[in-house]
Image (cartoon, rainbow, N blue to C red):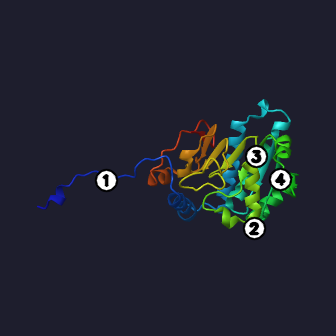
Amino acid sequence: MSSSVHNTSPVQLPEERRFLSPSEAAALERELLDEYRFGRQQLVELCGHASAVAVTKAFPLPSLSWKQRTVLVVCGPEQNGAVGLACARHLRVFEYQPSIFCPARSADALHRDLTTQCEKMDIPFLSFLPAEVRLIDDAYGLVVDAVLGPGVQLAEAGGHCARALATLRRLSIPLVSLDVPSGWDAEAGGDSRDEVQPDVLVSFAAPKSCAGRFSGRHHFVAGRFVPDDVRRKFGLHLPKYTGTDCVASL
């Protein structure tokens, strides 16, 4: 008989890993959308809710002064901006005081719907972002960066987003970035001299490769919604979630 009949080599499983490359992250999202029939709005809502929960864990409401409860959420025109809009709405439900600035409005129907929801909940939208950083530092307790996100290059986003990021880089108050800090390369990370340096990072589904260079105070992963089969397929080593929590600290 040929030796192949007696081959008892174990099946090779994906290597367990903590970070996803940009191509792997895109493939995982396609798996959720195409195979598991998640909807885009559903994923945005899950990530927006989890982002707001992460803020409550990093900055618990009882420990904050009234001024510190004010949150500026800066939302770009791509999917991360939609997540930021959902995050702002949930922050209002959690009794924080969010305001929203959109450096470039999107014509996308999901953005319009989420904007309407925020307006109906009396969340204020800023018509401009003060160029003088001290005004933002004095007015808000923290800022949520939902400007670009993975796969969106600053050059593609336009001048309004670039100017917003130039302001965020100079803030003294805490910065919370969603999934990939805006302006960072999703693979290599950011240059501390030229890019935003968030205090808190909320990774969606699983941390991206650039998260290995994150040096802030809190790193949360919002991936409890990822089915076990998908986690195994991509070899993800995700943290344990406590109780009914939708985020876990790394």
Mark 4 Cα-neighbour bin, 10 Å: few <14, some 14–19, many ≥20: few
Q: Is residue 213 above or below residue 110?
A: above
Name the residue: 28% across, 50% down.
10
- The span from disc 1 to disc 3 (Cα, nearest Å) is 47 Å
Mark 2 Cα-neighbour bin, 10 Å: few <14, some 14–19, many ≥20: few
Type of residue at label 4? Ala
Q: Percent x, y for residue 102?
A: 79, 59
Answer with mark 2 or mark 3, whichever residue precedes in sequence: 2
Query: Pointer 1: what residue?
Result: 11
Answer with mark 1 or mark 2, whichever residue precedes in sequence: 1
| Secondary structure state at the residue bearing disc 3 | strand
Answer with mark 1 or mark 3, whichever residue precedes in sequence: 1
- The span from disc 3 to disc 4 (Cα, nearest Å) is 15 Å
Q: Residue furthest front?
A: 193
Label annotation for residue 143: 3
Query: Pointer 2: what residue?
Result: 109
Label annotation for residue 100: none
Is residue 19 rendered to the left or right of residue 138?
left
